[in-house]
Image: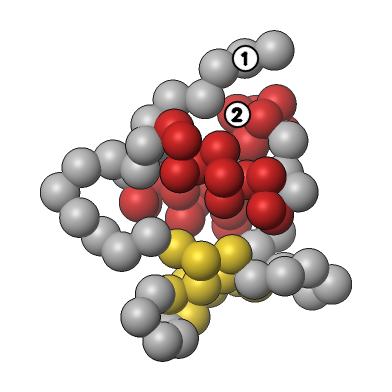
Amino acid sequence: MSRLTPCSRTEFIRKLRALGYRGPYTGGKHEYMAVSGKRPITVPNPHKGDIDTSLLSKILRDAGIGRDKWINA
């Protein structure tokens, strides 16, 4: 199994779009991305650094996206 690596917010959005998600849409304190039939994914706010692997892992687990599927997107 491949390992997750930190990714930029731009890369995060690009990969979600490759997996069929639309957005990001404005909502509350954070933007979100959606795909039909699934719960929306919260997009982390743009800060200086990359999205850490621990946060990325939690987001992918909540969305039901496997590591291999994410890495190959």
* Quadrant location, the C terminus: top right
Q: Residue at x 45, y 44 (%)?
A: 55
Q: Which residue is mark 2?
A: 71
Q: Residue lying farthest top? A: 1
Question: Is the C-beta separation of discs 2 and 1 under 8 Å?
Answer: yes
Where in the figure is residue 25, as x and y percent of width and height?
48, 80
Q: CA distance from mark 2 to mark 1?
A: 8 Å
Residue 37 visible within the image? yes
Residue 63, labelled with which disc? none
Q: Quadrant of residue 34?
A: bottom right
First-in-chain label (2 vs 1): 1
Q: Quadrant of the N terminus?
A: top right
In the rendered view, how is the structure colored? secondary structure
Q: Dot 1: what SS?
A: loop
Tell me what residue is drawn at x 52 percent, y 25 percent: 4
6 relative to 27, above or below: above
What residue lies at 60% left-to-right and 29% top-to-bottom?
71
Q: Is residue 19 visible?
A: no
Label 2 packing within 10 angstroms: few (<14), some (14-19), many (20+) = few
Q: Quadrant of residue 7?
A: top left
* x, y percent for residue 70: 63, 36
Above or below, comparing residue 65 to residue 17 in the picture: above
Label tally: 2
Which residue is outermost to the right? Answer: 37
What residue would you read off at disc 1?
2
Q: Based on the displayed image, in which of its 4 quarters is residue 49 positioned?
A: top left
In the image, residue 57 sits, relative to residue 63, either above or below, namely: above
- Amino acid type, mark 2: Ile
Which amino acid type is marked by label 1? Ser
Neighbor class of circle 1 (other Cα within 10 Å; few <14, some 14-19, many 20+) is few
Residue drawn 35% across the image and 80% down it: 29
Q: Of discs 2 and 1, which sits in the foreground?
A: 1
